[in-house]
Image: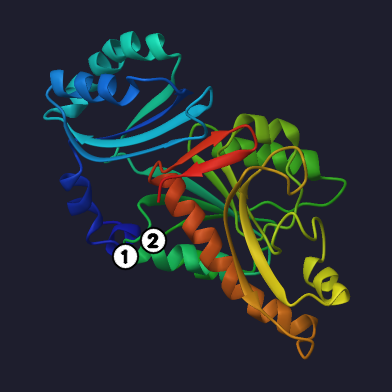
């Protein structure tokens, strides 16, 4: 048994429990008959719906979103034919859709710099079995957290970044992650990600920004908040796009502060918000609870 497996004795049992479970995500123009058609299709193929959530932006010409969990005996063997057969339904309703096996845990790469609080929250939730994912690696531009990460049995890659070496550093990061991870998490990774890297992981890079967006975009948001004299501070987890701190928002939270709190106090309070907000966003993504439409997310939580 590997060191990583020792930290999660419940993981293998959880995978066995979900071996025949799948999740379907659907988005399409709203019209009558969608739910009935999907439910009938799954029934005819011997599936049992465990959970179903739906949302419509506007019944008259709006978009419809749906998440379904279902069990199907011998799912792994039947999944390809199920997907092929479903095209008859999806074509009729102009659907964008995906089916995911619940037993296949998503592989996550966590990018960090020097601050450890967001990384630690992810590691603790992973260790407790509350994060249904495999943390495959941690990539950092500093060596500071190698001992911490390796104590969990997780690979740690030090990729230094300077203005002169940024292109080479990102090339190394792509080599480490391409085909090996499903999600990249920027856990207070204080570097700008290039458009090429973002394109490679479209809607699969989650960042934590230490303000309640769209307020205080960019660097030193706590200083900006202090200078403005805010009474609330917050944190925002969002998908990364080429627009700085402008991607689809996944989750946010806030905490009340006062004029007595200096910048360091705001940072201290903010660290707690950041770690919780990021962990929620990552959890929802790996459990296939998020659908992106334009620059918004629909979160079935």
Is the residue under label 2 in contact with that under label 1 (CB below 8 Å)?
yes
Q: Residue 166: percent from the left, percent from the top?
A: 80, 44
Residue at position x 74%, y 33% in the image: 195
Classify mark 2: residues with Cα within 10 Å, few (<14), some (14-19) or many (20+). many
Q: Nearer the viewer, residue 136 or 205?
A: 205
Tag 1 residue:
7
Quarter of the image where one finds residue 21: top left
Left or right of 14, for residue 240:
right
Could you give the CA–CA distance between mark 1 and mark 2, rounded to whole angstroms?
Answer: 9 Å
Residue at 79% x, 38% y is: 167
Whole-percent x and y of residue 10? 22, 60
As drawn, is 144 to the left or to the right of 16?
right
Residue, disc 2: 126
Query: Of circles 1 and 2, which is in front?
Result: 2
Residue 52, numbered circle: none
Q: Position of residue 12 (x, y in %)?
A: 21, 51
Q: Residue at x 71, y 77 (%)?
A: 267
Q: Secondary structure at mark 1?
A: loop
Secondary structure beneath label 2: helix
């Amino acid at each position: 048994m590997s060191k990583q497996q020792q930290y999660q004795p419940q993981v293998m049992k959880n995978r066995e429990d979900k071996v025949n479970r799948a999740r379907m995500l659907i988005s399409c123009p709203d019209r009558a008959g969608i739910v009935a058609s999907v439910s009938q299709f799954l029934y005819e193929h011997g599936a049992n719906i465990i959970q179903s959530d739906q949302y419509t932006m506007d019944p008259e010409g709006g978009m419809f979103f749906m998440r379904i969990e279902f069990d199907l005996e011998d799912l792994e063997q039947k999944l390809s034919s199920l997907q092929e057969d479903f095209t008859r339904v999806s074509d009729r309703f102009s659907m964008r859709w995906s089916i995911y096996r619940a037993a296949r845990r998503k592989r996550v790469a966590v990018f960090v710099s020097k601050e450890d609080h967001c990384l630690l929250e992810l590691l603790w939730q992973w260790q407790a079995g509350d994060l249904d994912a495999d943390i495959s690696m941690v990539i950092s531009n500093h060596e500071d957290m190698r001992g911490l990460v390796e104590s969990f049995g997780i690979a740690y890659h030090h990729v230094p970044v300077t203005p002169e070496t940024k292109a080479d550093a990102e090339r190394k990061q792509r080599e480490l992650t391409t085909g090996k991870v499903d999600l990249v998490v920027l856990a207070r990774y204080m570097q700008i990600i290039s458009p090429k890297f973002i394109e490679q992981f479209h809607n699969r890079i989650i960042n934590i920004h230490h303000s309640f967006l769209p307020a205080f975009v960019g660097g030193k948001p706590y200083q900006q908040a202090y200078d403005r004299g805010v009474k609330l501070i917050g944190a925002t987890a969002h998908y990364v796009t080429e627009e700085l701190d402008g991607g689809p928002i996944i989750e946010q939270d806030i905490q009340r502060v006062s004029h007595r709190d200096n910048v360091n106090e705001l940072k201290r309070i903010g660290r707690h918000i950041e770690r919780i907000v990021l962990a929620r966003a990552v959890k929802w993504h790996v459990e296939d609870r998020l659908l992106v439409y334009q620059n918004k997310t629909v979160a079935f939580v």
